[in-house]
Image (spheres, helix red, strand yellow):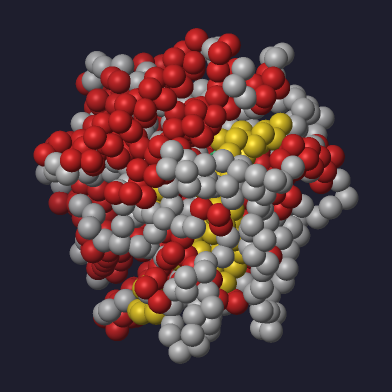
């Protein structure tokens, strides 16, 4: 450990906090004025409308309050890796994949290779891949990666290249390499690139034909497991060592390789497999048999390592003499490659990773985000934090040439069988938590509740780069999974607002509450997008007149909150267009994904629905990719989730135009005076929804809104107007 005088990391706070607190104070005054107005101006009729709109406003106010806990005291860390001792602890690296169709085997191989090339003592590293697809195609890709790694690892070491994901490296550095001509580098470069392309071709052609060439099958006994076809949901446990660490296998330069193990845990239809959490817990046990490192890095198969120093940065937290013993995990941000400049689907998660998590960082640390996190094995496996905890680990490296690897494989197989968890606390008090499609946040919350802290760290060179959904349907499905899961966390025994009290810090409780309550936003958003235009169409005013002094309160709150969120986004290098995209996507998600999450949660509580884990597709066809690059929204499939946003955008358009015509026809300053806020609100929704109208009526490409959705939505608009109006 480092000498007790030098800190391995330092912490600092964001500037200009006083200014922010002044803004907060003004805004709170605005909120109180608004409710004072609502309570003192209860109308004689249309009281239900008044109540619903007031309740929506109440929700916005409470959520605004929770949200300020992120902004109160953003905290950043700086690491000092140059102060690290020479002898660093072992790390087990876990990657999971689940479906060779949605997660191409070449992608999995690329991710593994990027991680295997960490600039870290290889004898301390072991790699474990979980394949929930139980696919020979994936095994084949990993096998080929293990062979290519013999060239790739020495190449990375010798020339200290970045990034170490071969696909990204050869793709991005092509030109600069061509004219940077150190003799041996150019030679080695072309050789390794050739090897890489050959590997890539072999993986892809095997995926196309669906058959691994007989000649390759003979080279590794592991292929025998697929001598009869395996069904992804019903097969024996598979554990195959592909590279033996500690000198068992050597690279092209004769240096030892890290351990590499392929695992597909046993699956039987009668046994719930608990999706990704189950996979990671199985890897946890396999790695305990094989290498048992004290730290566990887990990465999704679609996130490659972009920074070979990540583990060094991590160890600055885990080896710091003062704070390390409190830390259960270090979370790196999820960053994404290939996004468009204005982030069409708001999938960069900028607000979460550039703003919110720094806010979390000041109260015991960020939630666990599922990928790019390094856990302490002890805390993950159920140990509660006590202030006298002293981290210790033995330095027994895995295997080597003399180890009986087949015995290790056999032992590992027994801990990946369906019955291996029976009677044990896996998924409850041990490992990742079960029963929730956001196993990550749930597990992080459990760790925080057990007294542990976490750390959020953003190195200058991004640690990981992943793939994010590139069409509307995928992003809505992803948010449906997230918001359903988060709401489940809220209603679980770990609910931040009840169980959290006394266990978590107040700021942390508010941050967790804000996140876990995504789904219920759907109701106030629906209220605000539906009732004001409907009321307007019936000549009912829901807000103060322009000439009324109370108008200013609403105007202030509306403008200030939006201006603040715009300023915040620009501060983290966003753009105005990105902000508009964010608002649009937020509204669309609000009335589709979040709304569906509410429905699913109710059905689930009635025992009528089970929540699964719909895997996000990592493949995109060329035409769709072209549209994505031009920032044209992709709809294409007739998903029922498109109906509510389309309906609401059309309804607001209709009501806005109708009122505009009225104002002009009746020359009506009085209509305008009465309806101004409702007209502004609808106008805002219309402006934000322009791409929806375009997709429904103007575009002719394949990504346009399917006609059936446009028809349903239009019918629904009229149904709402004529059926609901009498009740208003
Ligand atoms: O039964 C399953 C389902 C999924 N996965 C893996 O889980 C990972 C994440 O799945 P993905 O479809 O890419 O979901 P995302 O929405 O991109 O994942 C985000 O959200 C998840 C929680 O919903 C977190 O677990 C992830 O880390 C986080 O990146 C992938 O590597 C999958 O292979 C499994 O191993 N087994
Ligand atoms: Mn993913």
If the picture is divided into quarters, which one holds ligand 1?
top right
Confirm whether residue 392 shows in the render.
yes
In the figure, 115 relative to 31: above or below?
A: above
Confirm whether residue 380 shows in the render.
no
Spot occupied by residue 603 in the image (x, y as percentages of width and height): 68, 38
Q: Which image quarter holds the N terminus?
A: bottom right
- For the point 74% across and 37% down, which residue is it? 406
Q: Quadrant of residue 555?
A: bottom left
Spot occupied by residue 357 in the image (x, y as percentages of width and height): 43, 64
Give whichever of 262, 328 is nearer the camera: 262
Give whichever of 479, 442 is nearer the camera: 442
Spot occupied by residue 507 in the image (x, y as percentages of width and height): 51, 75
Q: Quadrant of residue 193?
A: top left
Count numbered badges in the picture.
0
- Answer left or right for 375 relative to 79: right
- For the point 21% across and 47% down, which residue is it? 577
In the figure, 418 relative to 9: above or below?
A: above
- Answer left or right for 279 relative to 374: right
- For the point 20% across and 52% down, which residue is it? 575
In the figure, 311 relative to 364: above or below?
A: above
Q: Quadrant of residue 374?
A: bottom right
- Answer left or right for 124 relative to 393: left
**Extreme bottom residue here?**
5
- For the point 44% across and 15% down, which residue is it? 205
Spot occupied by residue 408 in the image (x, y as percentages of width and height): 75, 43
In the figure, 227 relative to 108: above or below?
A: above
């Amino acid at each position: 450990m480092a000498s007790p005088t030098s800190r391995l990391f330092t912490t600092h706070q964001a500037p200009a906090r006083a200014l922010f607190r002044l803004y907060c104070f003004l805004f709170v005054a605005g909120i109180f004025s608004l409710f004072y107005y609502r309570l003192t101006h209860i109308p004689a009729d249309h009281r239900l409308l008044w109540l619903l709109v007031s309740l929506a406003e109440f929700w916005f106010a409470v959520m605004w309050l929770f949200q300020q806990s992120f902004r109160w005291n953003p905290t950043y860390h700086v690491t000092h890796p140059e102060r690290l001792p020479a002898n660093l602890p072992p790390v087990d690296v876990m990657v999971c994949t689940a479906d060779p169709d949605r997660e191409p085997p070449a992608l999995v191989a690329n991710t593994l290779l990027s991680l295997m090339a960490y600039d870290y003592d290889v004898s301390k590293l072991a790699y474990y891949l979980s394949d929930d697809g139980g696919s020979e195609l994936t095994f084949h890709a990993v096998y080929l990666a293990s062979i290519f790694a013999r060239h790739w690892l020495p190449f990375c070491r010798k020339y200290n290249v970045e990034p170490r994901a071969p696909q990204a490296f050869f793709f991005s550095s092509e030109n600069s390499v061509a004219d940077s001509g150190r003799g041996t580098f150019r030679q080695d470069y072309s050789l390794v690139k050739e090897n890489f392309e050959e590997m890539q071709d072999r993986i892809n052609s095997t995926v196309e034909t669906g058959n691994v060439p007989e000649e390759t099958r003979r080279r590794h006994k592991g292929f025998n497991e697929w001598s009869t076809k395996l069904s992804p949901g019903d097969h024996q446990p598979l554990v195959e060592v592909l590279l033996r660490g500690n000198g068992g296998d050597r690279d092209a330069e004769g240096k030892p390789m890290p351990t590499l193990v392929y695992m597909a845990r046993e699956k039987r239809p009668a046994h719930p497999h608990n999706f990704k959490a189950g996979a990671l817990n199985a890897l946890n046990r396999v790695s305990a048999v094989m290498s048992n490192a004290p730290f566990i890095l887990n990465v999704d198969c679609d996130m490659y390592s972009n920074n070979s120093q990540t583990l060094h940065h991590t160890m600055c937290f885990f080896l710091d003499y003062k704070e390390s013993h409190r830390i259960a995990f270090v979370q790196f941000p999820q960053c994404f490659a290939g996004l468009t400049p204005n982030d069409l689907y708001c999938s960069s998660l900028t607000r979460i990773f550039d703003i919110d998590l720094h806010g979390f960082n000041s109260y015991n640390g960020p939630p666990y985000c599922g990928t790019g996190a390094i856990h302490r094995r002890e805390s993950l496996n159920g140990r509660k934090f006590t202030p006298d905890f002293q981290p210790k680990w033995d330095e027994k490296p895995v295997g080597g040439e003399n180890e009986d690897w087949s015995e290790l494989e056999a032992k590992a197989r027994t801990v990946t069988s369906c019955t291996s968890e029976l009677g044990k606390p896996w998924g409850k008090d041990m490992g990742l938590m079960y029963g929730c499609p956001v196993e990550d946040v749930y597990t992080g919350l459990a760790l925080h509740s057990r007294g542990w802290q976490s750390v959020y760290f953003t190195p200058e060179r991004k640690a990981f780069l992943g793939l994010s959904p590139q069409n509307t349907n995928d992003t809505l499905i992803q948010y449906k999974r997230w918001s359903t899961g988060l709401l489940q966390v809220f209603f679980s025994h770990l609910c931040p607002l009840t169980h959290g009290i006394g266990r978590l810090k107040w700021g942390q409780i508010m941050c967790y509450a804000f996140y876990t309550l995504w789904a219920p936003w759907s109701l106030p958003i629906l209220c605000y997008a539906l009732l004001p235009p409907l009321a307007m169409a019936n000549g009912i005013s829901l807000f103060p007149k322009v000439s009324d002094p109370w108008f200013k309160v609403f105007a202030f709150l509306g403008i200030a909150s939006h201006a603040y969120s715009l300023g915040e986004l620009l501060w983290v290098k966003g753009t105005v267009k990105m902000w508009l995209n964010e608002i649009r996507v937020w509204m669309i998600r609000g009335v589709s994904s979040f709304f569906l999450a509410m429905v699913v949660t109710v059905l689930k509580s009635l025992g009528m629905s089970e929540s699964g884990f719909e895997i996000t597709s990592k493949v995109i066809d060329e035409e769709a990719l072209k549209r994505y690059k031009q920032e044209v929204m992709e709809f294409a499939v007739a998903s029922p989730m498109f109906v509510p946003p389309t309906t609401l955008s059309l309804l607001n358009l209709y009501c806005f135009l109708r009122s505009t015509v009225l104002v002009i026809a009746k020359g009506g300053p009085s209509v305008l005076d009465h309806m101004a806020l409702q007209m502004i609100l609808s106008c805002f929704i219309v402006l934000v929804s322009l791409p929806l109208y375009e997709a429904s009526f103007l575009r002719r490409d394949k990504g346009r809104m399917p006609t059936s959705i446009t028809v349903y939505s239009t019918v629904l608009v009229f149904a709402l107007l004529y059926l609901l109006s009498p009740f208003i």
